[in-house]
Amino acid sequence: MQFSAPLKSNSKKIMLLGSGELGKEVVIEAQRLGLEVIAVDRYQNAPAHHVAHRAYVVNMQDKDAILEIIRREKPDYILPEIEAISIAALFEAEKEGFNVIPNAEAVNKTMNRKNIRRFAAEELGLKTGPYEFVTTLDGMKEAMNRLGFPCVVKPVMSSSGHGQSVARSEADVEKSWEMAKEARGDASELIVEAFVDFDYEITMLTARNGKETIFCEPIGHEQRDGDYVFSWQPMQMSELAKKRSQEMAKTITDGLGGQGLFGVELFIKGDEVYFSEVSPRPHDTGMVTLITQSQSEFALHLRAVLGLPLGFTFYGDGASAAFKSEVHNFAPIVDVDDSLFSDNSYVRIFSKPEAHKGRRLAVALVFDKVDKAIERARELIKKISDA
């Protein structure tokens, strides 16, 4: 592959649609290869804006505004980095010859839980828990009575766990309905899922470059309110469960097609594997790969997009812990204890321009045997605060 310099007439360009902390790491990897980067998001000074060559602020669901930027910049690759985005703009861009990663239809399927669940369960035959889609409170009550308690309620379209809840009894039904309306995206329809009796859940990072498919070591994670707070790699699991997880991840990513890295979320019960969700981009739980692998999930994503070889070395066990703000601040300060910067741990600050309660502002990373790494990550995250 030939590489050029950015800001030249022959520069190779990538455009990020969505410029959060995950996109920022993708941009850093792109800069290392001399790619020209355009970062687009709904608010000014988003994390990836800080490291891109050019940045735009636009309503991400405005088809015409997105297309105007694409046509102006003429990127070689368009990388959607968020769910709440105009899918019509992506289909039109693809029709005009632009390369959407992995492809517009894959983004369309994965950004909407109804689309991806039906595709996985009904078209590909992947094992999932029972589910129903509802649009009214009465409909949700009826679905819950059929599926039984506890059950999980999610908007068909949201990000970072917004709007997601667990209803453990009839007393929680109306609360779950109200929480679903807090979604970033489309809360006009909800998915109600029977609670799968699983032992643990994993993210199987899966990369496709058009020639091969590779898998990272499985990532275990802990969620609160539908959003990740701790992750670790590798997740200890049987060889059979791991093999079945890889097979399921390959089935869903083959079905979606295209190139890039996918975060495939799975439930594990003994040796049985159940499909949960998939994101056609780096996954928040995969931030742990910044310390465990020679090529992080962000580097692998870029390599896969460019069609480069996907080999990497797994250095060893590690864990990550997300720091979430406790305050609302238009000029946030993240106070980090010196102990986070040691021979086997460090912190990454996302540099978000505004903080609000529950917003991720940083991640602590630890390199050690899994149990020790998780314990250390839990300790270290308590030594970060904000104001």
Image (cartoon, rainbow, N blue to C red):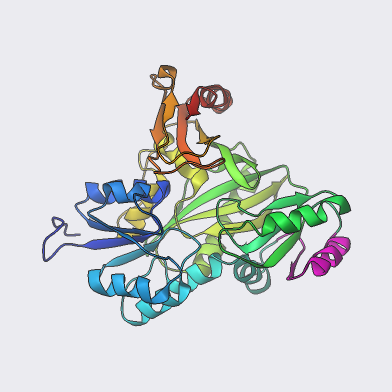
Instruction: Residue at the far bottom: name it.
Output: 95
Residue shown at 60% from the left, 51% from the top: 161
- Residue 60 image offset from top left, x and y in percent: 43, 65
- Residue 7 image offset from top left, x and y in percent: 14, 58
Horizontal side of residue 176 vs 41, given as left or right? right
Residue shown at 69% from the left, 54% from the top: 179
Horizontal side of residue 345 vs 307, given as left or right? right
Instruction: Kindly indicate the quadrant of the structure image that contains residue 229.
Output: top right
Residue shown at 29% from the left, 70% from the top: 69
Query: In the rendered image, is residue 196 in sight?
Result: no
Q: Nearer the viewer, residue 72 or 7?
A: 72
Instruction: Kindly indicate the quadrant of the structure image that contains residue 304.
Output: bottom left
- Residue 190 image offset from top left, x and y in percent: 70, 65
From this view, report whether residue 357 is shown above or below residue 243: above
Instruction: Kindly indicate the quadrant of the structure image that contains residue 228.
Output: top right
Residue 76 is inside the magenta segment: no
From this view, report whether residue 109 is shown above or below residue 209: below
Q: Which residues are magenta?
A: 128-147
Residue 146 is inside the magenta segment: yes
Q: In the picture, which quadrant includes the N terminus?
A: bottom left
